[in-house]
Amino acid sequence: MQNDALTSTVNTIFTSFFHSKKLGKYVCTHEGCGKTFNSKKCLNVHMQTHNGEKPYTCPSCGMKFLRKHDCNVHLRIHTGEKPFQCETCHKRFARHSDLKVHEKVHSDVKPFLCPFNCGKCFKRKHDLKKHITFHVKHSMKELSEIVEKSEENAHSTIQSAFVPVNKKYFTVF
């Protein structure tokens, strides 16, 4: 349960940090998500990620997919097709997104700045998200320690507020 809360908190921070300027008018109502979309169609496609619907099946291995495009890209695993090539080192990739991630290896640009103002920057969003998880875990630990100390203080304050009563004069109605 605590891990779910951590994941939800990290996702909320991450999403709000990166999508604060492009909020759509259609909001996902699934618990802990809150993503926004510019069209009802995009929201409906997104909602399939929450209900587990995967209508497209790989004819080679039977793996199921939410989107037809993802199924077609997956087929490249079976065919060995790698249509995307890095211009710097000539390494080939089955997916365009993998090429884009790889190209950052050849660059010193770190465009993903930590929203907690710790000064750290990252080449990839994924690395920033892992870093945000560290901040949230650290903050949750600090909060837990503060609550624990305040509970201890409250307990000792309550005990000192009670004055011993002489039972001989104390009656209950």
Image: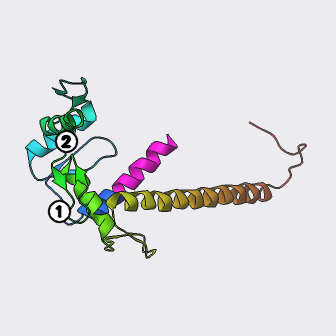
Q: Residue furthest front?
A: 90
The residue depicted at 33 percent of the width and 62 percent of the height is 124
Residue 126 against residue 47 in the figure, above or below:
below
Q: Quadrant of residue 102?
A: bottom left
Q: Residues within 10 Å of mark 2 (few under 14, many from 20)?
A: some
Tell me where the magenta segment starts and ends, as one range.
1-13
27, 115: nearer the viewer: 115
Looking at the picture, how far across and down is residue 52, in whole percent? Answer: 26, 30
Looking at the picture, how far across and down is residue 116, in whole percent? Answer: 42, 70
The residue depicted at 33 percent of the width and 72 percent of the height is 110
Q: Residues within 10 Å of mark 1 (few under 14, many from 20)?
A: few
Q: Which residue is mark 1?
A: 22
Residue 53 against residue 138 in the figure, above or below:
above
Q: Amino acid at mark 2?
A: His
Looking at the picture, how far across and down is residue 36, in whole percent? Answer: 19, 52
Question: Are discs 1 and 2 less than 8 Å apart at CB?
Answer: no
Q: What numbered label is drawn on residue 46?
A: 2
Q: If the image is split into quadrants, where does the C terminus sit?
A: top right
Looking at the rendered structure, the secondary structure element under dot 1 is loop
Q: What numbered label is drawn on residue 33?
A: none
The residue depicted at 8 percent of the width and 42 percent of the height is 41
Residue 155 against residue 48 in the figure, above or below:
below
